[in-house]
Amino acid sequence: MEEFQMSSNTAEKLSNLPAFCEGIQYFGEPWADFDSNASSAVIKEDQTGIDTVDDAAAYQTLLGADALRYVTLQVCGSKGSGHPGGFASSAEAHAALMMLGHTNIVTEVGHHAPGFYSSMFLDSSLEDMGIYTMNDMMQRFREKHGLLGHLSGAIPGLLAPAGPLGQGQHFAMAGAYLHRDKLFPVTIGDGGMGEPYVLNAMMHFNTAYPDVTNFLPTLIWNGYSQEHHSMVSLHTNEQMINYWKGHKFEEVILIDAKDFDDSDQEGTYVDSTQFSLKQRLAFTKAVLEGMDKAAKSAMGGTLTAFIIKQLKGAGVHTLGAKSHNLYPTDTLDQPHIIDGLKQRALPEAAWQIVRDNFSRAGGGPAVKTVVTESELDIVSLPKYNMQEFSKDEKAVPATTMGALVAQLGQSDKRFVVTNADGNEASAMKNINDALKIRHPTTDPLYNQEPTGQVYEPLNEDACAGFAAGLALFGSRSLWLSYESFAINGWPIIQTVTQAMAELRRKTPAIVTMFTAGALEQGRNGWTHQRPEIENYFGAMMRNGNVYPLFPCDANAMQATFEYATGSFNKGMVIIASKSPLPVYMSIDEARSAIDEGAATIYESASGDKGTVVFAVTGDMVFLPVFEAKEKLEAEGYKVRIVAVLNPRRLYRPTDIAWDTVSQPDDKFISDENFNQLFDADVLIAVSGGPSAPLEPVLLRTRAAKRDTVCWKRGETTATPTEIMDFNGITPEIMVDRVNTLMS
């Protein structure tokens, strides 16, 4: 690792400094009235936040804000990498939340990561990962097993990840739903405000859960995005307030740094760090008072937003979009970085004051006190009352699962089902019958009740986001969608499953179920025929904690749901149909198949022409496979049909990052058992979707002659048979492939 040289000024005074300051390169002179306002921390040892917003509180809040700026800039400069500018314009707001004792803070903005890490450093939370000093922090910043470039919930004291814009509000709402006695602020950058769904998601949530207002969106309105002006940079203050009020926010508190400027800065957005100390303190006190009012309003039952308006990059090395990112040349020995650090350098005595305040805020360091640092108590899973279907009947997999969902929701009142397109359309009306759609209009005909457990915003991002947030924060949830629309919500599921892989605690798996697969949606055409997302799931299997699951029938569906809901720190993706389909397995056989990865559901008694194995993911697609079986047996082949339910178990251990994740699962099918299933003269991998989930079969099979029959693209058709014909998923083509390979 690079060694960081401290200045001679630092070295001379190090003996008088707290140990955590080792590596801080510059110190400044005491501010005016330092002795009277900062003789000791305003948050006392037995307190969780300040009692009153007085001059001393404002003074020490400003010390905290500048400490955050300084650490953020120096840690980014240590690597010539990272994003200091956006967080810098939020520093007074973040410090105010800390000083008021509201430390369950999440963010929408992954680029604010170094600022959040600075907060965790200053409150001592990072000591839990071996970061005790500024030198430690610089060495571990943006390094493996250190402080990654964007937020992760695995970092001590941080509640949730932040990467793609537009996700943070879901974590704040999930936290508020689960912990009604705590405030969950979420910082949102105006660079991401060009998309309306951030506010739209909160508006829908408030309509469904009007009593859950203890989340506080905090807009960091600094006029810039990553590389240019933000799309809302020309809004007036009145327009911005109306924008939020138009999304049902009753209380919108806006603090504009421009109102306090005594430095004659040009433009709508100004840098408060250029004000006189008197006006800096006035601005900080206004932020503190406004934040206190906003927090009390949100906790008191009013949907509230707080807005801080000041120029991006305030108090760091440069301003505007140019402050967003450091490049390899922006190192600690460069004049503009040195100047930025010197301007924010605090007096030596200030650092212990900041540490005392931040480490006491909220009742202790965030690593000890925020809600995600302990496992949430949840009720035990019910013993599911399953319906065993016989192998001579047909049943609807989706409906069968719905009965178990109802049982889970009735036993766990915090359990939430989310669905944008409606459960009835996916043959799961039984969920609505039992759990009710959460809606302000009571209507028995539509199963609507204000206290329902089925959350139905018409936005897959909002559905996936709330379900994922609940799971990450420790509660059970289920996201239901059409497979064709799932891609609109999947990014946050990917974010959360990655976060779950890193967590230092146990949390229920995020469970999803995607119905109305491409083969069922002929009349709707290609808009509803997008099974390509299964390739996404297939690729994510290698992450170590993602499991695409393909129950082949209604019995297997029940065993699959039982398996998924009993799992932890994993992403469980169930894919099944809403049509009546044949039953191939008993429930116990299905449990074994899920545990092993696959099972034989049919095998010919004999055949002298050679052995053909069909390895199949799906349910409806078995229909042409069994037709092909009849034709091949008539030609003299022995045929084995293997249902692949849990393909992740079919990989080799070296294919999967299983040993890098929390709650690791090291179970993989043995070579002996794999070969018993898939040894053949010809192996045909068949899927109603794409081929990626069958990769482990194709990797491990000893069959030299093998091929795939799978989805190509969508078309409007009258029947499933016609769409399968269009894609070449037909008995005739399967038989032809076998004969071609054998010849």
Image: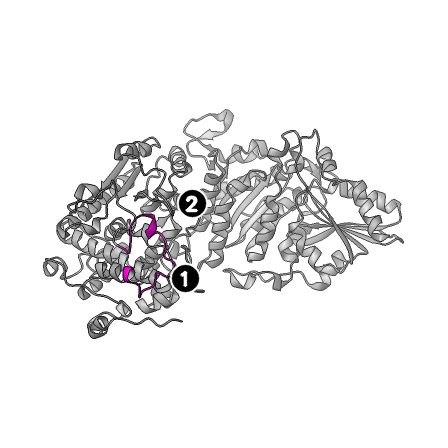
Question: Callout 1 environment at 10 Å: few (<14), some (14 to 19), or many (20+)?
Answer: some
Tag 2: amino acid: Gln
Q: Is residue 699 above or below residue 240?
A: below
Q: Which residue is mark 2?
A: 167
List x then y, in percent, for residue 391.
74, 42
Name the side, left or right, on which 269 lies relative to 692: left
Q: Which residue is mark 1?
A: 142
List x then y, in percent, for residue 595.
64, 55
Between label 2 and label 1, give the one nearer the viewer: 1
Q: Main secondary structure of the magenta part?
A: loop
| N-terminal label among 2 and 1 | 1
Gap in Å between the C-alphas at discs 2 and 1?
22 Å
Q: Which residues are magenta?
A: 316-336
The residue at the point 45 percent across, 64 percent down is 144
Q: Is residue 644 above or below residue 423?
A: below
Question: Callout 2 environment at 10 Å: few (<14), some (14 to 19), or many (20+)?
Answer: many
**SS of the residue under disc 2:** loop
Tag 1: amino acid: Arg
List x then y, in percent, for residue 439.
43, 30
Q: Is residue 394 visible?
A: yes
Q: Is residue 123 visible?
A: no
**Residue 224: quarter of image:** top left
Label annotation for residue 257: none
Q: Is residue 735 above or below residue 145?
A: above
Q: Is residue 332 magenta?
A: yes
**Residue 352: quarter of image:** bottom left
Q: How is the image coloured?
A: one colour
The residue at the point 31 percent across, 64 percent down is 332
The residue at the point 51 percent across, 51 percent down is 509
The quarter of the picture where the N terminus appears is: bottom left
Name the side, left or right, on which 43 lies relative to 592: left
